[in-house]
Amino acid sequence: MFWSILAAMPLQNPPAASLRVNALFASGAVLQHSSQPAIWGSARPGSQVTVRGSWGVSARATTDANGQWKTRLKTQGPGGPHRVVIAASGETLTLGDVLLGDVWLCSGQSNMEWPLVIWAGGTQAIGGVEASAAANDPQLRLFQVGRGHSSFPRSDLDGAWAPATPESTRTFSAVGYWFGQSLRKKLNVPIGIIHASYGGTPIEHWISESKLFSLAGIGSRADRMARAANERRAHETRLNQADPDGPDRAPPVAPPPAAPARGQPQHPVRAPAHPPPPRAGAHGRGGG
């Protein structure tokens, strides 16, 4: 079991003056039980953030200069529903119907992406229509990460938790749903499945730019990807200058690392997805 990398995160970074929490932590969420899952978000820089679970625990954090915060909240055994209350600078967010269970991340390319029923090409998973129609488990929760591209690391993502119903499962990963259903039958605890797949994406798109710079032997492919990334950066910069508050506005980005030594890979692309803090209370397996 390992924590994989979430897919592209298209949403704008939230304003630092407003208390926000990452979309993974919302009403209806599943948190990893009997552990200390990470919870993160944003608020006014220098704010004291308190996170309280209705099972009798709390955690604190202080936002950094960019308004970002992260803490870990100790959880008890499987069960719920619970409430999580987040407070900072006079603002309060209340997350209701939170379950404590096992959380898995299902990620990969088209095999993992293939949904139970609705597919762009019209082909359905074998048995998917029947499985979707029969889906009715409020303790199996599904989170579909929205797809998108970005040359910049992002701090949030597009998505929401939903219980397993005919409506929520139709476009959800067939492998992910059946995996979650199997876990529910075997373990009899709440199960959260986070699905983040993107068919046809190269592995370089799932690796941070700094990590790619540390790898030898990727050569010309990294060069080509770097040129494409630099062109996109330039385009996003022009959009920012033309309309600083527009919908396509991208956050400031640090300059790429210094050129590596001779013989090392040159200018790999910045990954379109910014991974969450490692081991954020979830397990995961990739799908090809």
Image: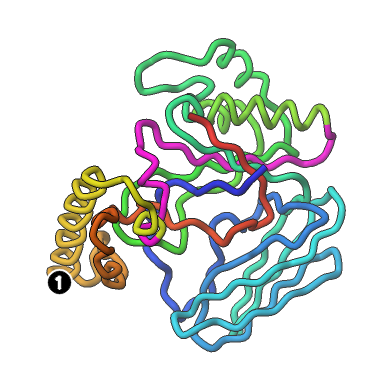
Question: Does the magenta run of residues contain 150?
Answer: no
The residue that appears at 58% across and 43% down in the rendered structure is: 194
Judge from the rendering whether residue 172 lies leftward or rightward of residue 249; answer left or right: right
Q: Quadrant of residue 180?
A: top right
Q: Which segment is the magenta one?
A: 187-210
Which percent across, then down, holds residue 288? 48, 29
Examine the rendered structure and indicate whether residue 183 appears above or below residue 132.
Answer: below
Colour mapping used in the image:
rainbow
Would you say residue 190 sits in the magenta stretch? Answer: yes
Q: Which residue is mark 1?
A: 241
Q: Is residue 208 left or right of residue 142?
A: left
Left or right: 115 with respect to 73?
left
Report helix, strand or loop for mark 1.
Answer: helix
Question: Within 10 Å of the Cα at label 1, are there few (<14), some (14-19), or many (20+) other Cα atoms?
Answer: few
**Percent x, y for residue 81?**
79, 52
Residue under the point 73% across and 75% down: 59
Question: Is 131 above or below relative to 42?
Answer: above
Residue 49 at x, y percent in the picture: 63, 80
Q: Residue at x 48, y 80 (%)?
A: 67
